[in-house]
Amino acid sequence: MAAKAKTGPDLKKRTKLLLTPCKTRAEIKNWIKYHLGLDMPDVTVSRYADTNPLDAIWEIYDICVNKRNPQNIGELLYVAGRGSGKTLGVAIAEFMVMLHDQRDVVHVGAILSQAKRCYEYQVGFILNDKIRPILDSKNDDGLPILEKANMEKSIFNL
């Protein structure tokens, strides 16, 4: 059953789902769960915190893709404990922004290993069983959807 999901009408449906921008926080949570297989925390768990990983992803995405920025935010800074998912959350937001806004993304970590970890997350997204067949397919112009992916640059033909 799973083998037929790689081609035909199902691939077209999954491609549309992958490339359709999210309009709400609930849609982005479902997109992440369906395409990336991740259930991002969406509740604040610390009495000292005022946000959570899903809120951070949504805020970045909503500003970049949906152009909703009533406070005219030019920079965002998220502070959280080590191992709290900051790098994973930013990797998800950047990946979605590249797909849904055809925007160039540059990730700079506090240290090189952090930036590399973010990129490794994104490579993992590209190689996962749900996304890889879509990115290996061709766009309407006959070009491969994923033209290039390396530490220096990823190019999507969307």
Image: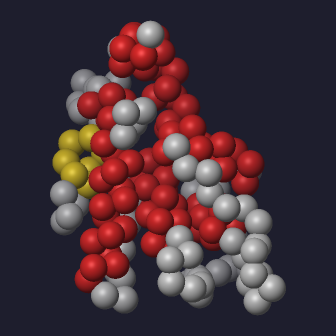
Picture colour scheme: secondary structure
Residue drawn at the location 31% of the way across and 64% of the way down: 119
Question: Which residue occupies the foreground of this view, 72 or 55?
Answer: 55
Point out the residue furthest to the right here.
Answer: 47
Q: Residue 86: horizontal and vertical position, in percent?
A: 52, 74
> Looking at the image, can residue 3 be seen?
yes
Q: Quadrant of residue 57?
A: bottom right
Picture quadrant where residue 72 is located: bottom right
Question: In the rendered view of the protein, which quadrant contains the C terminus?
Answer: top left
Please count the marks in the image. 0
Lateral position of residue 144 relative to residue 36, left or right: left
Which quadrant is the N terminus positioned in?
A: top left
- Residue at 33% x, 45% y is 126
- Expressed as whole percent of the image width and height from the top left, the position of residue 115 reads 32, 76
Nearest the camera: 126 or 146? Answer: 126
Image location of residue 69, percent across then percent down: 69, 71
Height in image: 118 above or below 35? below
Taking the spot 57% from the left edge, 85% from the top edge, the residue there is 81
Q: Residue at x 25, y 24 (%)?
A: 142
Judge left or right: residue 94 versus residue 133. Answer: right
Task: Tell me: 79 left or right of 156.
Answer: right
Q: Nearer the viewer, residue 108 or 123?
A: 123
Whether residue 32 is visible to the viewer of this picture, yes or no, is no
- 9 w.r.t. 47: above or below: above
Residue 83 position (above or below residue 143) = below
